[in-house]
Amino acid sequence: MNYAILDIETTGGKYNEEGITEIAIYRFDGEKIVDQFCSLVNPERPIQPFVINLTGINSAMLRNAPKFYEVAKRIVEITKDCILVAHNAQFDNRILTTEFDRLGFDFDLETLCTVELAKNLIPDMPSYSLGKLVKSLGIPITDRHRAQGDAKATVELFKMLLVRDTNKEIVRAAIKKAPKLELNTKLLDLIKEASSDTGVYYMYDEKGTILYIGKSKNIKKRLTQHFTNDNRKSKEIQLKVASISIEKTGSELIALLEENDQIKRHRPKFNSALKRTVFNYQLESFVDEDGYINLKIEKADSRKKAITTFSNLQSAKDNLARYIEKFKLCQRLSGFEKTTGTCFNYSIKECEGACIQEEAPEEYNARVQQFLDKYNYSSQDMLIIDKGRNTDERSVIYIEKGIFKGYGYYNLNHQVNNPEILKSIIKPMKNNRDAQYIIQSYLRKRKALKIVEIDSNSEN
């Protein structure tokens, strides 16, 4: 039996939005290490300050590191036909699975957790955290909270646990797959009939009342999760659902927009979260008395003109930190630091000195304007081109003078730059703040295939 013993360091942050900063994997055949892989990874998102203090890994170290998609093939190769072993395997497996999901790859390995194994095989230890446990067992560990050091210590811990498990019963019992609950025939049939497409799905009761509306990149997989979860809401849905309908969208962005629109129209019983607005904070700009464009995070206010909106304060701060780094903006003028002198970035030569008027307003504002042009479509005429429902088709989202008009689909052989042709294929939708937030959030993650600026006055 082969094992992939690994450790992952992440950026921290919102659940399922963390990025990998470092990964180490040792392929272990039960006796010895037969292959190994270790690499820093550029997560393409900010690292939480407490994580930097814990691991010592900062954004400067990762600037030239490979992105996850560049190391993904190597990870698949070294973990092939392996059981994934980690200290708190549920966390590492979730992070890896999430990263592969973003690439559209189904990463699915059996897992084995050395925390659970150790509790069974070495009971009554004062602590089962990796550092304290290996110290108690006399296992050397170097570079604590770095992937390679922690993974190597986990290898030595796993060797010790294998020796203690003389009957191999606990190892076999500890191998975990996703919960396999016994499903009744009704739920099995609903899953069987569902497709694996990207789109929106509707659950109905026996009277045809909509119980729940959701979106997914893989509807069959998402329904399976609904029907195997054992939380209270899932159990209620499982009892009441009688039928399902599916609307394929091809584009995840259109699925998000349709889900938001349909939930607000129908207000299903089990969709309480999206009945309310999904954004709580927004980014605004103003010009100070010295002529510099300033940025500021504020609570969402429909009376004020926002550059872009965010679901929560942490998301706003994380994205603002990314903008500051990408466009070399001043932390103080961006509202990231409350100081009267130079900002921290000036001390490390990442700010050109706008905070102390060392850089002229015209030069600094030009970079801010680049940011505004990229992330604020308030006055733009543009098309967001994305995947269609089949290989011969593309989806298009139409924004006219900063107003979201709707979406449609076109054949690859057709040109859709002409606004009059566009209007004939577009399904009209409401331009509300939630739709703006969804589009801006999607564009921040750069998922669209192409963005095309158009001339709304063109007749050709």
Image (tube, rainbow, N blue to C red):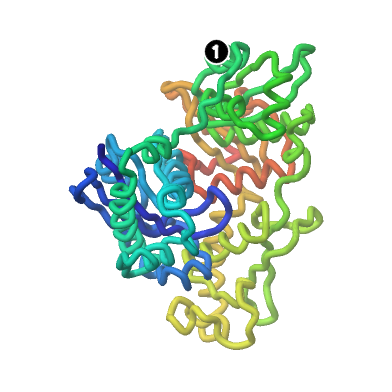
Residue placed at 63% from the left, 24% from the top? Answer: 201
Q: Where is residue 105 drawn, in percent x and y? A: 39, 35
Classify residue 60 as left or right of residue 25.
right
| Looking at the image, residue 203 lies above or below residue 366 | above
Q: Secondary structure at mark 1?
A: helix
Question: Where, by quadrant of the figure, is residue 61 drawn?
Answer: bottom left
Classify residue 441 as left or right of residue 269.
left
Residue placed at 39% from the left, 66% from the top? Answer: 136
Q: Where is residue 52 drawn, in percent x and y? A: 46, 70
| Looking at the image, residue 71 lies above or below residue 368 | above
| Looking at the image, residue 136 lies above or below residue 373 | below
Question: Where, by quadrant of the figure, is residue 111 drawn?
Answer: top left
Residue placed at 75% from the left, 16% from the top? Answer: 205
Quarter of the figure that contains the N terminus:
top left
Q: Where is residue 370 drawn, in percent x and y? A: 52, 61
Between 109 and 71, the residue placed more toward the observer is 109
Residue type, label 1: Glu
Residue 109 makes an appearance in the image: no
Residue placed at 46% from the left, 54% from the top? Answer: 123
Classify residue 265 as left or right of residue 336.
right
Between 262 and 381, the residue placed more toward the observer is 262
Q: Where is residue 183 drawn, in percent x and y? A: 58, 19
Q: Find disc 1 in the rendering and name its residue.
A: 193
